[in-house]
Amino acid sequence: MYIILQLFDFILHIDERLAVFLADYGIWIYGILFLIICVETGLVVMPFLPGDSLLFAVGALAAFTGELNPALLIALLFVAAVLGDTLNYHIGKYIGPKVFGKNYRLINKDYLFKTQAFF
């Protein structure tokens, strides 16, 4: 429960936390941001990470402090999002048929086949 409260506190005060991260980790902030965006985009179980609000907060921090390179941030976070999306695609491609091949009460096979035919 404590971890969930800490996560909510981080999300609600993301601007303050980013300034602390920047002061504590310096250049490593680029790697941390890359990892957060890649995981938030790519891992199916991590959509609750604050990706969109993080992007706005990082942009504001880069604009007001001048300690982050905006061009590098744009390129780095773009690559992180694309890699995360590619990772998510491959997870679905290889694990999806194994999961949906079994009979579950929550998954209607007819709806699954209609969705596959549509896309």
Image: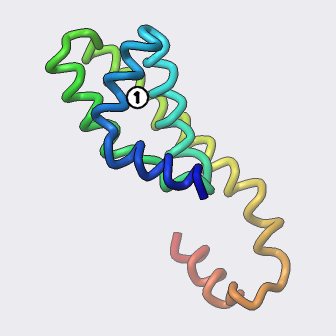
Considering the image in quadrants, where does the N terminus appear? bottom right
Query: Residue 58, percent across and down?
Result: 29, 29
Residue appearing at x 33%, y 48% in the figure: 12
What residue sits 31% from the left and 23% below the top? 19
Check disc 1 and report the residue beneath it: 77
Indicate left or right for 72 with 28 as reference: left
Q: Residue furthest front?
A: 2
> Picture coordinates of residue 103 (x, y %)?
83, 85
Tell me the residue at 82%/75% (across/down): 101
Label 1: how many residues lie within 10 Å, few (<14), some (14-19) or many (20+)?
A: many
Task: Residue 77: give x, y in percent of width and height.
Answer: 40, 28
Q: Residue at x 50, y 54 (%)?
A: 5
Q: Quadrant of residue 22?
A: top left
Where is residue 53 shown, x and y percent of the image?
30, 44
Q: Amino acid at mark 1?
A: Leu
Task: Using residue 95 as the reference point, say whether residue 16 is left or right of it.
Answer: left
Looking at the image, residue 33 sits to the left or right of residue 52; the answer is right
Of all residues, the one furthest to the left in this rendering is: 64
* Secondary structure state at the residue bearing disc 1: helix
